[in-house]
Image (cartoon, helix red, strand yellow):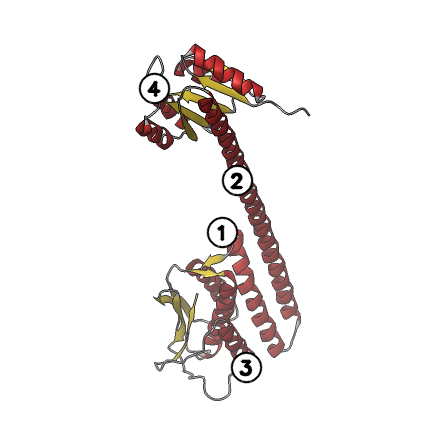
């Protein structure tokens, strides 16, 4: 495909100078179109095909600065080389501030034409670099958008797959007659659903790097309460969580920790025939980037000492998740049981 010649729009009402410019630039292979007024120049730009504008300061109706002001309102106008009379430094500065790519002072002889050719070459090069930069930024933005769409779809599929696995575990639990095996399978189902909940949040979020923790915990606790009540446990859940965005990997760990602690509280905090009680989950920001997570009840109480009730699997999982969060499990002294973790998010 043949290379298209560069087309220059020369806006100047001096026919003699215009002929000199046309001849000089023509020898460089440029195509020069000349108009006398800003109005004619703006009308010519409507047809596209102009690569550079050479704009004189003094025009029959106003100045070139007026035309620059109009050009600034247009999307992606061609670069402008502003032509001023000798000694008009303030006009040149005003033109550059108004959006001109370069300026040239009028002089007598070949020096002006040489400077004009150089300014045109530089304006074209700057425009080319700006176009390449814009194209590269657009490509990066489009690639980022494609990656986000793909990641949303991955999270959607992972959430669906985990929900399917949880449903299969639930079906298996109903087929098992051993109560211990049933409990173990139900606990496994709750852990799977805690992780699936994070992926559901990511699928519906504009930011796949983090999860709004209060919304996630509200959804998680709603599922846990329904499950535990269906199993015959009567405790009531209360959530007090600040709106904090938490990185995805830490949100998964938080979800698993809350699932284990809440499940243990449902099972062991209140006697089976005592009518239940309250289990409170708190998530608060205590310093810049540092949070505290607490799960507490008013039940029979436990301080983390002695053998764990049940199989001890839940305690081991919580300890492992706490280490992953860079935290240690604490048991603040109070009525019932309170488990607390502090860590950076």
167 over 276 or under it: above or below: above
Which of marks 4 and 2 precedes in the sequence? 4
- Helix, strand or loop under label 3: loop
Residue 78, visible in the rendered structure:
no
Name the residue tied to disc 2: 133
Would you name the residue on which mark 1 appears?
205
Secondary element at tag 1: loop
Nearer the observer: mark 1 or 2; the answer is 2
Q: Are marks 1 and 2 in contact (CB under 8 Å)?
A: no
Residue annotated with mark 4: 63
Across and down, in percent, residue 138 comes to 54, 40
Q: Quadrant of residue 234?
A: bottom left
Tell me if mark 2 has few (under 14), some (14-19) or many (20+) residues whose alpha carbon lies within 10 angstroms of its own: few
Residues tagged 1 and 3 counted as in contact (Cβ below 8 A)? no
Of circles 3 and 4, the one toward us is 4
Position in image of residue 189 (x %, y %): 58, 67
Observer-side mark, 1 or 3, equals 1
Work out which quarter of the rendered image holds the N terminus and state it.
Answer: top right
Residue 266 lies, in percent from the top left, at 47, 74
Crowding around mark 4 (Cα neighbors within 10 Å: few <14, some 14 to 19, many 20+) is some
Q: Residue at x 55, y 68 (%)?
A: 191
Which residue in the protein does label 3 denote?
Answer: 312
6 left or right of 92?
A: right
């Amino acid at each position: 495909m043949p290379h298209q010649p560069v087309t220059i729009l020369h806006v100047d009402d001096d026919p003699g100078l215009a002929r000199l410019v046309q001849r000089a630039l023509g020898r460089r292979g440029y195509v020069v179109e000349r108009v006398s007024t800003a109005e004619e120049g703006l009308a010519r730009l409507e047809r596209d095909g102009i690569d550079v504008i050479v704009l004189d300061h003094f025009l029959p109706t106003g100045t070139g600065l007026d035309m620059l002001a109009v050009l600034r309102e247009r999307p992606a106008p061609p670069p402008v080389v502003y032509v001023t009379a000798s000694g008009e430094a303030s006009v040149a500065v005003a033109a550059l501030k108004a959006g001109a790519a370069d300026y040239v002072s009028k002089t007598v002889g070949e020096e002006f034409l040489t400077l004009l050719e150089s300014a045109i070459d530089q304006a074209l090069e700057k425009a080319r670099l700006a176009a390449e930069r814009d194209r590269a930024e657009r490509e990066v933005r489009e690639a980022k958008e494609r990656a986000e769409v793909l990641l949303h779809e991955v999270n959607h599929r992972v959430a669906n797959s985990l929900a399917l696995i949880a449903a299969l575990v639930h079906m298996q639990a109903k087929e098992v007659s051993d109560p211990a095996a049933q409990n173990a399978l139900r606990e496994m189902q709750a852990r799977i659903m805690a992780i699936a909940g994070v992926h559901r949040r990511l699928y519906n979020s504009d930011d796949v790097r983090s999860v709004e923790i209060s919304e996630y915990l509200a959804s998680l606790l709603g599922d846990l309460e329904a499950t535990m009540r269906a199993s015959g446990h009567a405790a009531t859940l209360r959530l007090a969580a600040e709106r904090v965005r938490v990185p995805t990997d830490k949100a998964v760990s938080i979800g698993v920790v809350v699932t284990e602690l809440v499940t243990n509280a449902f099972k062991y905090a209140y006697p089976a025939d005592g009518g239940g009680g309250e289990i409170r989950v708190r998530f608060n920001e205590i310093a810049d980037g540092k949070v505290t997570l607490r799960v507490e009840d008013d039940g029979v109480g436990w301080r983390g000492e002695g053998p764990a009730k049940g199989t001890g699997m839940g305690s081991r999982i919580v300890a492992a998740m706490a280490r992953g969060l860079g935290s240690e499990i604490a048991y603040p002294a109070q009525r019932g049981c309170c488990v607390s973790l502090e860590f950076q998010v």
